[in-house]
Structures are given as C-alpha cells and as structure tokens.
Amino acid sequence: PLWVSLGTGGGGRRQKGCGGWGLEREGDPWAGREGKGDPGRRGDPWAGREGKGTRGGEGTPGPAVRGREEPWSSQPRCLTLGRWERPLLVSAGWKHRRSCGDYFQLERSQEQAPALRPPRATGRDGSFQALGVGPALVSALQSLSITQPTAVQCRAIPALLRGGNALCAAETGSGKTLAYLLPLFQKLLSRPSLGPTWPPSPRSLVLLPSRELAEQVRTVASSLGRSVGLRVREIGGGRGMASVKNQLRSDPDADLLVSTPGALCKALRKRMVRLERLYCLVLDEADTLLDPTFLDLVEEVLMQAPIAHSPKEVADQWDTKTQLVIVGATFPEGLGQLLSKVTSLGHFTTLTSQSLHHLLPHVQQKFIRIKGSDKASELLQLIKDQGPSNGALLIFCNNASTVNWLGYILDDHKIKHLRLQGQMPAAMRAGIFNTFQKGQSDVLICTDLASRGLDTSRVELVINYDFPSTLQDYLHRVGRVGRVGSKVPGTVVSFVTHRWDVDLVRKIETAARRRTSLPGMESGGLPGKRGQLRGTGIGPPGWTVSPEGFFISHTDCV
C-alpha cells in the first residue's frame, strides 16, 4: 500500500488523574527476564529487524505502540510482517476486566493525505484543462481557489467524459464530488437545453442519502453552475410536497437536480418530475443508498430512468440513454444484483484507489479501553484539552438517545455545542450542520448521519464516544478529519467499552501491523487485482494498474 511507513503505538495504562497522554513511569517489566514467563513475550521480538521486510524503503524505524514501554508492543514503522507471522496485539487481552485503562495509538506516518499525492507520469501536465475540463469550468474552479486535481479526479474525469457507466471508489475526503460534477457539467455544456416541460425533466440527477449531504452537494454544484450558466435545483424530504411542487413549477428546466431517494420517489409517484431525458444519473455514497433503508427507493428510481447498456447509447445524439455513475468509499454486496436489473454489467468502467479500505496514514488514531461509567468524564477532559482555539470537534454516538443524553451533560458543564441525529424533526435539523461549518459552534454531537460525505474540513478531532458497529462505519468516521482542504491531518480517539468492540479493534490493529486493508472489506463489491468485482460478478478480466495507483478495467469505453 501507499502508506507503508504507518506505525502503531501504545500498550500501556494512562496515569490516574492525568489529563493528557502521559505514561506510567515504570521500567520494562520484561527486562532481564528473557527465557521466562510468557513465551510470546521473550525479549524484543523486533530486535535486529529494523529495515527488513520493508517495501520501497519508506519510513524510518521507530516505535509504534507506546505505553508501558514494553518492547513486545512496539513495531518499527518500516517493518512489514511476513505472511505467516502472527502479530502481537496490544488489544489481545482487552476482554479481561483488568484491561480498563490500557490504550494504544496508530502514529501518523505522513502529513499529506494520499489523495493529494501528485500523479505519476501520465503524459498530462496535471491540470484540469489537461483532463478535458473546458476553460469556463477551469475559470470557475480558480474562482473557488481550486487549481490542482486530486488523484481520484485525475483518473475519474477522463473516464467519465468518454462515456459509459462507471463505478468509482476512493477513500473518504479524496475529492469524489468534483470528480463526477466536472465531467457532468462539461457534458451539459456541450449539449443544447431541450427547453422547459411539465412535468419537469432534469438533464442530470444526483441522488444522496441525507438532506444535509444533498444541501452540501447543491451548494458546491450551484457555485460552479452559476459561473457557466447551468441551473441547479434541490428537493429534499421534510419540506412537504406542496413546497416541492411550487419549487419545481418556479423553475422547471433545471440542468441538475439534487435529491434524496424518499423525496424523489414521492415526486415521481405524483408525476411532479420525469426522468426520461436524463443524460447522467449519479448515486453518491452508494454504500448507504443501497442498504435496506433506501434499496427499494433507489431501485424504483433506476427503473424509471433509461439507463444505457453501452457507451454507444450514451453518445447517441438522437436517442441518448442515461449514463450511470456510482460513487462511494465502499460498495455493498448487493450492488451487482441491483445493477443487473437495469443495465448490462459488461460495460462498466471501475476505478478504485489502492488506499481504499486502508487506515488513513496521515491521521493519528488512539484507542482507549475504558469502563462505560468513565466515558463521560474522559470525554469532558478531552474537550477541555482541545480548547476553543484548536479547531472543531465531532463526537459520534450510535443512537439518538445517547446524543441527547450527552447534550444534557455538556449543557451542565456550560459547553456550547450542537446536536444532529435522524430522529429530530425536519425543521429542527435544517441548518444545524451549516451552523457548525460556519464556526458558530466548535462541538457537534451526532450519529452516523454525519459520517457520510459531509465536508468537515475544519474538524481537527473526532471522538468515537460509542465505538462503531462495523469497520465501514469506522472508516467513514475517521474520514471526517484529514480531508482534502483540511489545514491539519487531525486525530481520532475511540472509547472501547464492550467485548464486541474489542473484536473490531483487534481487526484494526492487525491491519495496521500487517499494512493491509481492513479484513472482510475486500469482497464488498470492489475490483480485485485480477479484474473481478468480488461478490457482484461485475468486471471482465483484463484489469491493469494505472500510474496513479488505480485499478482500471479495459471495457469498450476505455
């Protein structure tokens, strides 16, 4: 992987009453005990191995797991374990009741996000214009202080401009929104508007799982669209269908419609909007859109759009079909089954970065084994240490009741904060995230509603008050810091309370020590190195690795 030098660190207990990450002042418990005690901890298992097993010589030997300064718990950054080598885990004993107070941390190995690595030699000069973006859009990007494409944009923009259905997966915070908006706008500019109709029939559609995310994408798209004369409209849930109808009547010839599945399906059933003239349909945050909550609604939308079966149908000027673009940080297992109902699976161009499903190398990640009764006091200490001048803070909980309870705790301690969870009335939810983004509050308590896609570039610390229930949720939460445009890489602190939390922590620590992707996510519908989209049946053989580190399929449109 690209982040070979990632280190891990930790293994000890925190000092009682210590507000920071202090270490107990005790000697090495294994000093002078070689050959005695636990055979798995005899001496330093990494001694004399610095520099071996590295890939490309990245990084420097250094401690990784810090705490009680036990040699067995540290792993040099440049060390890669052998295939059959069993890693020694700090979290191995965390199901024991006496493990409370232990912690370990994954040290950051680089300051820059992998998405910002400059592309290797590709024959292009690394500018948006070289990727096929027109001068008008390039000028609009410059007005937003965006001058250089990210790695995923360098690969996705030319592929989408060539036409054909596509799946694009890259790590969180890598610039995927512009990766599909720019080619979409470029195509709209090259084709004449067909004039207003009723019911309205937008020329392109972006479907997103939440109102907050839809509002964010609409804001980005509108800032670009105004500069080039394209109209962007949004319909979301919680506003009533009468207001949606009035909005569609006021401007029926929108070039781009941004919507959530529930609101769009209601509009389709009431014949307030049609999808027969779509040039492009984008499913953003596909892993959330295709979970059981939205699956039936998304399928209903796809069945009403004339999805193309080949790139030639997208390019046909007389009977243009809809280009389908699916974007996300992970792909669900049922993706292939759903797509097979609406299009041919043999003509998909699939792009995925090599950093996908890996732990972010530029984000420091700390795991604290803690009793449930101590979590609130530990949280208050972390907020106090963060201070008002050290950036914004996100606190993740697993359910709405915990969000509300924590809010009362912070109220009692006179800590200004905002809350965001899915059970809030629509009127109360409206504008909460925008208020947080504008800096009117530096603390946001939320559920996983805020973990997908939202731009949190001002956040410097994420606290998992409740440990996430899946590895996918953990990756999305970590992705709230260290994003493209963030001033600092950021830090994530996770409270590990339950025995089932420990199982996930062990998988994370194992992946960090082995420098591999998180286990169990390789078959989530993403292309493997031999050209298969595992678990979905998508993707013919013949995959190659692009110079930027992306897997790309050779289909009819490449």
Image (tube, rainbow, N blue to C red):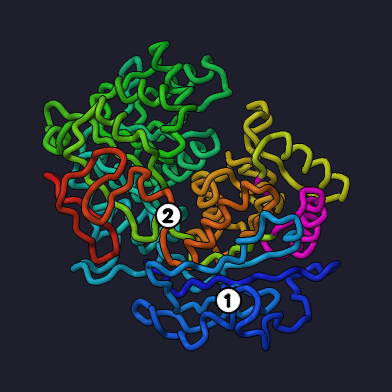
Q: Is residue 393 magenta?
A: yes
Q: Residue at x 30, y 21 (%)?
A: 303
The residue tagged 1 is 74
User: Earlier along the polypeptide chain: callout 2 or callout 1?
Assistant: 1
Residue 374 x/y as whole percent:
81, 53
**Which residue is under mark 2?**
357
Q: Is residue 458 left or right of residue 16?
A: left
Q: Mark 2 and 1 residues: CB-CB less than 8 Å, in contact?
A: no
Q: Residue at x 21, y 41 (%)?
A: 348
* Nearest to the observer: residue 184 or residue 340: 340
- Identify the secondary structure beneath mark 1: loop
Q: Residue furthest top?
A: 270
Other residues around mark 2 within 10 Å, as few (<14) / some (14–19) / many (≥20): many
Q: Residue at x 24, y 35 (%)?
A: 323
Vertical position of residue 55 compared to residue 149: above or below: below
**Residue 341 lies in quadrant:** top left
Residue 547 part of the magenta-drawn span:
no
Give the spatial CA distance, label 2 vs label 1: 24 Å
**For residue 139, side relative to residue 99 (left or right):** left
Magenta residues, as a range? Answer: 369-396
